[in-house]
Image (cartoon, rainbow, N blue to C red):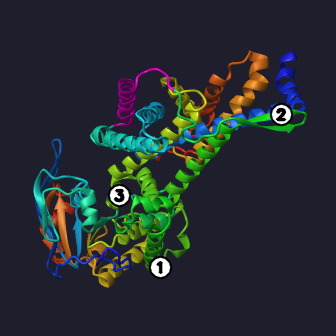
Amino acid sequence: MNAHDTSFHGRMDDGIEPGKALLHVDNISLSFGGVKAITDVSFDVLKGEVRAIIGPNGAGKTSMLNVINGFYHPQEGSITFRGEKRAKMKPYQAASSGISRTFQNVALFHGMSTLDNIMAGRTLKMNKNFFWQMWRYGPALQEEIEHRKVVEEIIEFLEIETIRKEPVGTLPYGLQKRVELGRALAAEPDLLLLDEPMAGMNLEEKEDMSRFIIEVNQQYGTTIALIEHDMGVVMDLADRVMVLDYGKKIGDGLPEEVQANQDVIDAYLGVSH
Amino acid sequence: MELLRQIFIEPFETMIALPDLLLQTLWEGFVSGTLYSLIALGFVLIFKASGVFNFAQGIMVVFAALALVGIHALGVPAYIAVLLTLGVMALLAFTIVRVVLKPLVNQPEIILFMSTIGITFILIAGGQLIFGGEPKAMITTELGLPTGSSDWEVGGGIVIFQHIDIAAALIAALLIAGLALFFNKTKTGRALRAVADDHQAALSVGISLEYIWVVVWFAAGVVALTAGILWAAKSDVSFALQVVALKALPVLVLGGFTSIPGAIVGGLIIGFGEKLFDLYWGSPILGGGTESWFAFIIALIFLLYRPEGLFGEKLIERI
């Protein structure tokens, strides 16, 4: 996709064939002072799949997402995304190479409207310079209009037309999560990281969110890595599941394999270590 | 009884008896109010984007004015000197972000605040070293700012409008409106508000904190230069000017540290308030000189009863 094409494609063209690894995480170890958050974990995410990361509280799931999108820098190991290998990534690099994410505790821009939040998600797609923006004229105005159209598409896709202008701080939790998904989608990511997308939702909201995740995956071919606690959701949505416990990988495979894995059952039932 | 009369009756009698005096006072209050607003805006921009209370804002006003006069003294035409000074402020913004803020990222706010005190001293010393410490005249006429005054006859008296005051109010108002629009309507403005709301989320959508910081520090530099020119046109360019920036503190307390409209309204309230109070209450009852402290008393009252200011975000701790 060239820089002047502002229509919504759902994702960038990453040049990786479906079924091949889009992301490779190799031997990652991460510690904070003396606390080991992740110990020597490797896994991959194949293009086009929905990959779930599960595990008990404190297992290092969110830390793993933070490593992938560059918030945390692991002491050991490397990450290969779209064929590019990096020891550490900066959040800006991660975002510009096609990784976007949502957060466990909804990290929206609370003072801004739904529209502005999703527009902010298109930051990297907008490249008219400061000079034009200053006068809000010419190319910059044109650009605003084009990107606004894309944002409207996303709003329609997520069925949040009615809250377009509402400040997101006032929205119910379930809708905030949906706006956050919208902001992540606005970047047209190759890899979408979702940190507990259904946390704190009621059954109906969970069903809606599952539907959106499946549609994003199927309609745009976006690769998704998600953390989730609701095993029902994970078994329904995920193509493959990785299990972390105390920062170590204890299981990896198809949902039914993982479900039958004795280590995983022990971890969830809390067998002493 | 006499005191009550002085407080509740006499001032209003004077206002009605001498409408020209009232109008003159209101006008002067408006002019200084717009300048307070402008300086307060410099603080608000930086505070919103980086959570730093920029102690150096006052000295930035002096530094910008000194740089302008200094560059002009080298024989550079006035308008080119303004452009070069803007360049100096951009360089300053870039240097501060690179050398001071970036290495201190994720440090507690008090550390960042302390670092701006450090910047203040560096700018004072640097300014004296490069431009010398003695007061200088602002290049008012060279910049095409008007001099002289117009009179307006009202109710048997006259109200005097200094032309420089009219220009100052106009320029300050235009700059404030321009900045407010820029930060509300453009992509960079949206990014600024995003950074103000949530650093991590802003990073995750690919907003560069460093870029936003340079933009706001530069904007604060532009504000400082404008305030420096307009204020120094009425007195002269000296390090005493930074005291003016102290007046922005009560404005911020009044308007809220994170609110652009708050800075504007707060500045006007302080501007009108201190002039009116001094003339009608301060001078007759307390013997004058109230202008220098009136704003701080108002700020104190606000801190006691409404610490978030008129427009600031209410601080609610979630349990």
Residue type of the residue flagged with mark 1: Glu
Residue at the image position 39 percent from the left and 62 percent from the top: A129
Q: In the picture provided, is B244 more to the left or to the right than B49?
A: right
Residue annotated with mark 1: A156
Q: CA distance from mark 3 to mark 2?
A: 55 Å
Asked if badges 1 and 2 are on one and the same chain, I answer no
Q: Chain of mark 2?
A: B
- Quick check: A65 above or below B248? below
Magenta part of the protein: which range? B108-136
Of badges 3 and 2, the one in the foreground is 2
Residue A108 shows up from this direction: no
Residue annotated with mark 3: B207
Residue B222 shows up from this direction: yes
Q: Chain of mark 1?
A: A
Residue A173 is labelled as none
Residue at the image position 12 percent from the left and 50 percent from the top: A75
* Res. B285 image quadrant: top right
Q: Chain of mark 3?
A: B
Residue closest to the eye, A222 or A139: A139
Quarter in which the N terminus of chain A is drawn: bottom left
